[in-house]
Amino acid sequence: MVRIRSLSEQTGCEILAKAEMLNPGGSVKDRVAAHIVGEALAQGRLRPGGLITEGTAGSTGVSLAMVAAAHGCTCAITMPDDAAVEKANIIAAYGAAVQRVRPVSIVHPDHPVNVARRTAASTPGAVFADQFENEANYRAHLQTGEEVWRQTRGRVAAFVSGAGTGGTLAGVSVALKRRNPGVRTFLIDPPGSSLYNKVKRGVMYTAVEAEGKRLRNPFDTITEGIGINRLTANFNRAIVDDAFRGTDREAVEMASYLLRNEGLWVGSSAAMNLVGAVKAARALNRPGAVIVTLLCDGGHRHLSKFHSPEYLASMGFTPEAKGRGLEFVE
Ligand code: PMP
């Protein structure tokens, strides 16, 4: 857990972040991969030498490839080809098979999740990790929430994060509310995602409706790993008090701000989480309140996209946070 000094000074709250990029596989998803594979092994559904499949934007693939190797299993990952290529390269380095597919909706048979499910079904002894629906994901993050409680010595006033599968927000929110029902929990949602509406109004399109409305095309957001248009079993567990919307511009500016003011190099979802922390500080309006979020992964695996000046310029972004305050957070 690290204190984000500049954001704490500027908001008047204590803004703390768990440095999940320091996990051995480089992201928050190590915990999830360890639990999913651990449970499958304990239940006898997976044995050493068996195959683990998953459809993922990348981080879960890296973590599963690492955990599979450590358990003597094989791993096959399907990912959309618009996700940063670094993640595909890391997965392959761990010895896993990587298939990159055109980004399509979840109702399409070629969606990475559907490809991974089919591969497991047609391979004897294979297990589909199923991070969106497998509640081992949420259970892994009950532990994350307990760590937040312990590391803040029970002083945590609020937790905020984005959601992809929803496992993080679900596990942490449930664990913290068990400890103290007064802890406030917030979602920060990127462009193109329906989770904001789910929290604010209880409205969530089904996958088919989202497809009909052409929600969440690949260009909705440049953030990776967060935002979704269907209600997953893991998100369904989350206890969320309120939600904020975050823009790509805010995430880009926050990443630049953290580099220049903190020497902190993080990925797009971590940058968005800290945008959420600033919004939570403003919403709470309680000087000194402890607000916690996660640094989901580091900048290294985003060099070709979120941390490429050329890519950002091509998307219309020229970050200019150096030496400035937090005016870029709306
Ligand atoms: N950040 C990154 C980099 C991710 O890969 C993910 C998972 N898709 C998330 C954040 C969101 O976490 P969760 O799936 O627990 O909602």
Image (tube, helix red, strand yellow):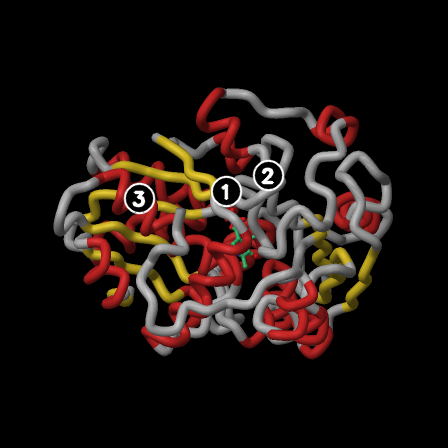
Q: Nearer the viewer, residue 81 or 327?
A: 327
Q: Residue furthest top?
A: 202
Residue appearing at x 56%, y 49% in the figure: 226
Tell me: 81 left or right of 30. right
Task: Mark 3 or mark 2: name the one nearer the start of the chain.
Answer: 2
Image quarter where the N terminus lies is bottom left
Q: Quadrant of residue 64?
A: bottom right
The residue indicated by pointer 2 is 193
Tell me: 52 left or right of 298. right
Judge the density around disc 1: few (<14), some (14-19), many (≥20) Cα neighbours within 10 Å: many
- In the image, what residue type sits under mark 1? Asp
Q: Position of residue 181 (x, y in %)?
A: 23, 31
Q: Is residue 228 visible?
A: yes
Q: Quadrant of residue 314?
A: bottom right
Judge the density around disc 2: few (<14), some (14-19), many (≥20) Cα neighbours within 10 Å: many
Q: CA distance from mark 3 to mark 1?
A: 13 Å
Q: Position of residue 109 (x, y in %)?
A: 86, 40
Q: Are marks 2 and 1 in contact (CB under 8 Å)?
A: yes
The residue indicated by pointer 1 is 189
- For the residue labelled by badge 1, is the local secondary structure a helix, a strand or a loop? strand
The residue indicated by pointer 3 is 280
Residue appearing at x 60%, y 58% in the figure: 60
Q: Is residue 120 visible?
A: no
